[in-house]
Amino acid sequence: MEAMANTGGERSGAIRYGRRTIAGLALASLISGTLMIILLVRLISAGQAVSGAPVSPIVGHHAPNFTITTWNGHVGQTLKLSDFAGKPVVVNFFGSWCAECVEEQPVLNAAWQKYQSQGVVFIGVAFRDQQAAATAYLQQQNVAYPCGPNPSDTAVVDYAVTGAPETAFITPSGIVLNKIIGPIDDGTLAREIQALLKQ
């Protein structure tokens, strides 16, 4: 009888151990599932950011003023964003070392030619570039709108620039309407400028 009692005790202990194991596995599965959902949400958010959803903290806020010293046109001229108050402004952060900048430059040039008569201002801000290389780039690409460095580099920080190219669109009232990260195509650029002209 004692042997049978002991066997029964061992069985009930085994059952208790099994229930604990199942409960532990269920809890681990729940935590894993929750983490997978969080990961999926973050991946979807990242996908939306890549697909063009607004990602810049500057969008919707007043455009910080900045200064450039031109490397083309009237070389050495100092220009401020505030000089163009009341006008729609397209600010392009570029680099002569940037292959995507080379790809989008003809699009920017064509838009400048088309919209300058409507008062749209284009400004190129050199991003981590050297004057000799950038000057050669601007000549090769026939860039006629003013381009140059922001000597203090405050524009890069203020406009949350993480690389080149990036393009900000500023309304006549000085609000950043949108910012495109990466190369811009002619359709997107035309839509953004039309939106500026409606402000």
Image (cartoon, helix red, strand yellow):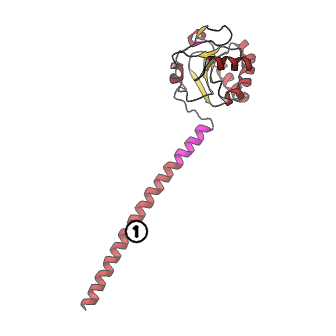
Front-most of residues 75 and 38: 75
| Residue 63 lies within the magenta run | yes
Quadrant where the C terminus sits is: top right
Residue, disc 1? 22
- The x, y position of residue 10, in whole percent, is 30, 81
- The x, y position of residue 174, in whole percent, is 56, 16
As drawn, the residue found furthest toward the bottom would be: 1
- The x, y position of residue 69, in whole percent, is 59, 11
Residue shown at the point (59%, 10%) measured from the top left = 79
Q: How many marks?
A: 1
Q: Amino acid at mark 1?
A: Ile
User: 56 left or right of 96?
Assistant: left
| Residue 114 lies within the magenta run | no
Residue shown at the point (28%, 89%) measured from the top left = 4
Location of residue 144 (image quadrant): top right
Location of residue 48 (image quadrant): top right
Residue shown at the point (64%, 13%) measured from the top left = 71
Q: Which residues are magenta?
A: 40-69
